[in-house]
């Protein structure tokens, strides 16, 4: 997978690890993902299906903490899964008049994004504890 991120440098490597974690958890292997920090008019994030297995994710960074940014990335990566496995592009075309709150794909992304961030956080914390214990007790 080709992964390019243009976000705050202080956490860009963690974003890359997070996206790899999400791909594993969501059982997807996109060819390319580009994540850019953008102030999106009226939104926090957007997933764009560029072409087959290639996606652009826009994330609002301004005025948000890392937890909020990671939740948005998880939300948009769920849309990547939906594009790849559930024909989200066709559904968007066929359901243009459906209200945002009525879209099952948005409900799924909202319901699953925070638990994915929490699972990743637990994994990072347990890895850090192992590394610290290894260092302290050697």
Image: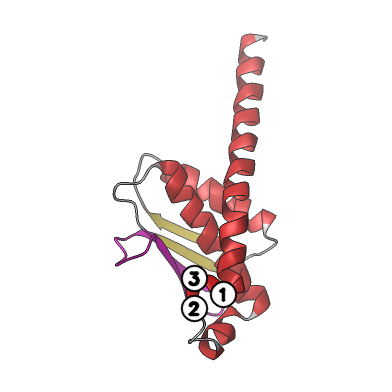
**Disc on the earlier residue, 2 or 3:** 3
Question: What residue would you read off at disc 2?
Answer: 99
Which numbered disc covers residue 30?
none
Question: What residue would you read off at disc 3?
Answer: 55
Q: Secondary structure at mark 2?
A: loop
Q: Give the foreground label among 2 and 3.
A: 2
Magenta segment range? 36-59
Q: Residues within 10 Å of mark 1 (few under 14, many from 20)?
A: some
Residue at the (49%, 78%) spot, across then down: 99
54 magenta-colored? yes
Vertical position of residue 119 compared to residue 78: above or below: above
Q: Position of residue 42 (x, y in %)?
A: 32, 66
Question: What residue would you read off at disc 1?
Answer: 103
Q: Position of residue 69 (x, y in %)?
A: 43, 49
Contact, mark 1 vs mark 2 (Cβ under 8 Å): yes
**Disc on the earlier residue, 3 or 1:** 3
Vertical position of residue 50 compared to residue 12: above or below: below
Query: Camera-side residue: 20 or 60?
Result: 60
Q: Position of residue 55 (x, y in %)?
A: 49, 70
- Is 83 left, or right, of 4 in this rendering? right
């Amino acid at each position: 997978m080709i992964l390019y991120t243009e976000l705050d440098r202080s956490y860009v490597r963690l974003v890359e690890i997070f996206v790899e974690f999400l791909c594993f958890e969501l059982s997807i292997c996109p060819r390319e993902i580009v994540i850019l920090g953008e102030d999106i008019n009226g939104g926090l994030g957007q997933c764009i299906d560029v072409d087959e297995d290639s996606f652009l994710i826009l994330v609002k960074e301004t005025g948000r903490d890392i937890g909020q940014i990671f939740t948005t990335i998880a939300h948009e990566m769920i849309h990547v899964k939906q594009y790849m496995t559930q024909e989200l592009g066709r559904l968007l075309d066929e359901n243009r008049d459906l209200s945002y709150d009525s879209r099952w794909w948005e409900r799924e992304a909202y319901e699953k994004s925070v638990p994915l961030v929490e699972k990743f956080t637990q994994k990072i914390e347990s890895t850090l504890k192992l590394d610290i214990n290894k260092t302290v007790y050697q």
